[in-house]
Image (tube, rainbow, N blue to C red):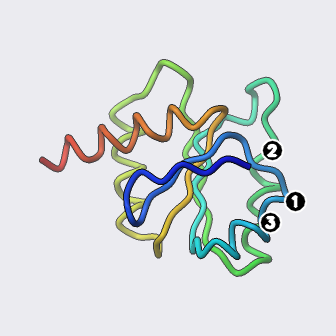
Amino acid sequence: MEIRQITENYSVAPQISIDDIAQIKDAGFKSVISNRPDAEDGAVPHDAIEAAVREAGLDFRYIPVISGQITQENVDDQAAALDALPGPVLAYCRSGARCTNLYGLVTQQRG
């Protein structure tokens, strides 16, 4: 699993697996956000990830973002999740790029 730190409280990763959850917790993350739609090729269904994340005592949000089609609603939902979730937060998608771009848009929106 490759984790890329964006800020002190926000990191991104490519698709995670259930087997990665213990390592995520051990790394100090308190919350996980899935930005990968379940229908995308190669995606692990978010409900399976969510169950493992919650079983490990971490918080979880599912905010699916279609590749190349980030909407204002996606940005608003991500911003609200980042405000509500305990950090640090790990967000994942297929490669981590959507999560990174989404964070940039949230930051830009906040000025």
Q: Is residue 66 left or right of residue 101?
A: right
Residue at the spot of label 3: 51
Q: Quadrant of residue 105?
A: top left
Q: Outermost residue toward the right?
A: 19
Name the front one of labels 2 and 1.
1
Residue at the spot of label 2: 45
Residue 50, percent across and down?
Answer: 74, 61
Who's the residue at 70% across and 81% down the image? 57
Q: Quadrant of residue 93?
A: top right
Of the residues shown, which amino acid type is indicated by label 2?
Pro
Of the residues shown, which amino acid type is indicated by label 3?
Ala
Residue 100, percent across and down?
Answer: 44, 39
Who's the residue at 39% across and 29% down the image? 71
Residue at the spot of label 1: 19
- Marks 3/1 in contact by CB < 8 Å: the verdict is no
Who's the residue at 58% across and 42% down the image? 35
Who's the residue at 64% across and 71% down the image? 27
Closer to the chain start, of discs 3 and 1, is: 1
Q: What is the crowding at mark 1: few (fewer than 14 residues within 10 Å), some, or many (at least 20)? A: few
Q: Is residue 68 left or right of residue 75?
A: right
Q: CA distance from mark 3 to mark 1?
A: 12 Å
Q: CA distance from mark 3 to mark 2?
A: 10 Å
The residue nearer to you, when weighing 69 against 29, is 29
Q: CA distance from mark 2 to mark 1?
A: 14 Å
- Marks 2/1 in contact by CB < 8 Å: the verdict is no
Closer to the chain start, of discs 2 and 1, is: 1
Q: Is residue 105 above or below residue 7?
A: above
Describe the element under mark 3 as helix, strand or loop.
helix
Q: What is the crowding at mark 3: few (fewer than 14 residues within 10 Å), some, or many (at least 20)? A: some
Q: Is residue 70 above or below residue 55?
A: above
Closer to the chain start, of discs 3 and 2, is: 2
Of the residues shown, which amino acid type is indicated by label 1?
Asp
